[in-house]
Every structure is written in C-alpha cells, then in structure tokens.
Image (cartoon, rainbow, N blue to C red):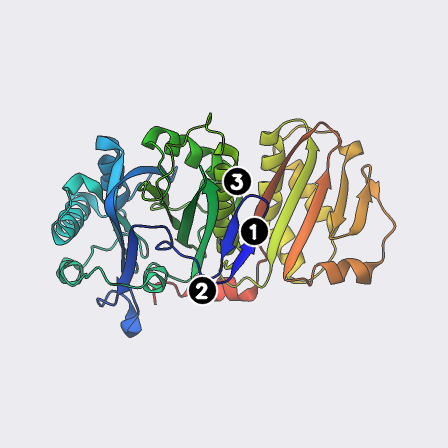
Amino acid sequence: MIKTKQAAYTILEDGNVSSPGGFQAGGAAIGLRKGNKLDLGWIYSEVPASAAGVYTLNSFRAAPLLVTEESIRQEGKLQGIVVNSANANACTGEEGLINAYTMRQTFADQLGIPTAYAAVASTGLIGVQLPMDKVIDGIHSIELQGQADDFAHAILTTDTCTKQVAVTVSIDGVPVTIGGAAKGSGMIHPNMATMLAFVTTDAAIPADVLEQLLKQSTDQSYNMITIDGDTSTNDMVLVLANGKAGNKELHPGHADWEKFYAAFHYVSQELAKKIARDGEGATKLVEVRVQHAATAEEAGAIGKTIVASSLVKTAIYGADPNWGRIIMAAGNSGATFNPNNISVWLGDVQVVQAGKPAAFDEQSASKQLKQQTVVITIDLQEGSEEATAWGCDLSYDYVKINASYRT
C-alpha cells in the first residue's frame, strides 16, 4: 500500500473502511438491484465501538434512520452496520418501520452482537416496501471475510464510482487509522442529501467527544456540498471508534488532538468532495472559496448559494465566463456584504474587481472553466472569515438520469 505524507497524517492508497484495526466490511448481491449488482453491505467491529451520527434535516425521515438513532442513543456504541441500496425504505409507514427493526434484529443475530449495537441504513427509491424475504436471506448469508471494496459498491445507487479514503496519524506514539466510504450522486444539498457516509477509526475516543467532532467536521465538509438543491430522507453519516490502536483516550485537551482532528477532517472533506465530483451527469467539480467575510456562516451561505445556482452550474458546463451569474447568486445568499467591495476570480483570472468588471481575456477565463476542477474565488473584504463549498456543473445527462430514475 502506497502512502502519501501530509503535514500531520499519511494518506493510504486504496484505503477504505476496513483499513483501521479491528474492522471488517463486505457486500453481496441479494436481488434488490438489476443485473445482479451488489446491493447489501455491512461493516463489523471486533469489539463494541464508540459511535456518533448526524442525520438529514428533511421532515420525512426514513425508517432506518429512526432505528439507527435509537441504537446510538441507548449506549453511544455500535458494533455493526448493515446497508441496502435500491430501496430507501422511506415514506413506508408502520410496515417500513417494522421492516427496519427486523433488519436490525436479523443482522445483530447473524453477527452475535446485542441488538442495540446494530445500525441500519438504506438508500434508493422512496415509497416502496422492502422485499424482506430477499433482505433477510441476504443478511443470513453474511460471512465476516468480506472485501471492503464490495461494501463500497453495494451502497451505490446512481453513483458512477465508489468513494473511499483512509489515513494514518501518530497519536501517543502509536499509529491510528481513519477510514471511510460514502455514496451520493444526486439529491445532494447542504445539510446532506441522498448521501450516506461511514467512517471508522481504531482510535480510543468517547462517544460524546466523537459526536462533537463529527458535527464540527460535518459543517465544513458534507454540509458544504450541493448537486441539485434537494435534501433527501435517508442521509446520515455514522462514525465508529473501537480503540484497537491502543492510544490514550482522545479529547480536545489531548496533546495530539489537533493532529487527529486534521486527519479526521481530511477524511470527511475528501468523501464530501468525491460525492460532489460524482454528481449525476457531472463533468466537473466546482469549488467556491469565499474569503474575507464578516462571519464564517455568511461565507458558507455565499459559497453554497453559488454552487447551488443552476445558472452558474450551466455556465460552467458550457465554459462560459458569465460572472454576472456568480454575482447574482452571491446577492441571493442572504449574507450581508458591500457589493462595491466584492472581487471574483475564475481560477487565476480576475473577472470582477471591487464590484466592477475587470479587464480579462475571454479565452483565458473560458479555459479555467474547462478544467476538471473549476475554482471560483470570492473576496468580500468584510472581515477575516472564510469557507469553501463544493458542487458540480449541470449537464444534459442530469435531466436524462433523473427523468428515468424509476425505470
């Protein structure tokens, strides 16, 4: 395994959710998706792990989310997660809730762990009951010699690729590993969307500290991406920390806390960016950097509004340096700033200076919008805060994919 060193951590090539010590993961094809595709995945920790989650803000909250919340709420621990794709088990009423509980119990029994230590997640079509005969038979077939890459494939829906990452960082002189896998391609918007993310670590860290860490990191990663402005019913991010690395328990006062946070945040941000890059029909990743804002919240609001704008997204798809759309979106964000101070860059080409058009070469600006990653920088000259948001362009294929989603 090739390692790439960063300032505080090392990125593992081909890293995944089973890279941390004491974790296993796998996937199987149980007939929920067409073409015998993998559609049931699981993660297992050798020992009960501290657990934390963040969840969708959609008013319609899917049954698996409710069951998983209940599990974590009991003791702040999990030992296994089972995930199905193709069917969201959302808006399915009492029957759907019973099915989610059945999934949890069946999975816990199969692994021989307490029911409360099992979590459930689902993703896919809304409003359709799960074929529980297939789900139960699939769970009964689970064996703990799986491949993490199969897990990453099993959780996909319209995604075009898996999303995995892992890093190591030295804590108390011992190597600690953080790994993750995610899915998400459409119905993605700040406060999460049709996205699921699962992060594992062999660090020792209590559940309450893990929860605060996750919330803080989520605000700067998963909640800073948007594909189409729609927030889904099933979104969640789950984190498990099983303590197998042997470090002293982590907390904000720990000498290596900043190192661990940097590594953890890299995993969160990298998964979020992979989701944004794989937006349905996307051809480019869009990164909006908002600088010198009065508050971080206003910087974030501007960045998210720009990457969510259909007019901005289509201009980027067409490589049209129509900076007026960027200014329009910033002005619609609800943030307070002086329009006469704003400056805008497309890549390294400045197109607006102090609220007025800057002289620039159209071809050079258009070239910046043809890159695989398009960077838009906004300088507000209002303060010292900043934020970065990620999204993608809007292509013809987005309409094709979503026009025929059920078929």
Disc 1 marks a residue whose amino acid type is Gly
On residue 161, the disc is 2
Q: Looking at the rendering, which quadrant does residue 342 occupy? A: top right
Mark whose residue sits in front, 2 or 1: 2
Determine the residue positioned at 63% across, 30% down. 335
Q: Name the residue under label 1.
A: 391
Q: Which structural element holds mark 2?
A: loop
Find out whether the residues at labels 3 and 2 contact each other: C-beta distance under 8 Å.
no
In space, the residues marked 1 and 3 are separated at their CA atoms by 22 Å
Q: Which structural element holds mark 3?
A: helix
Residue 309 against residue 299 in the figure, above or below: below
- The image shows residue 343 at horizontal and vertical percentages of 78, 40
Determine the residue positioned at 69% across, 48% down. 376
- The image shows residue 204 at horizontal and vertical percentages of 35, 37
Q: Which of marks 3 and 2 is nearer the N terminus?
A: 2
Q: Which structural element holds mark 1?
A: strand
Q: Is residue 13 at all visible to an observer of this figure?
A: yes
Find out whether the residues at labels 2 and 1 contact each other: C-beta distance under 8 Å.
no
- The image shows residue 288 at horizontal and vertical percentages of 64, 46
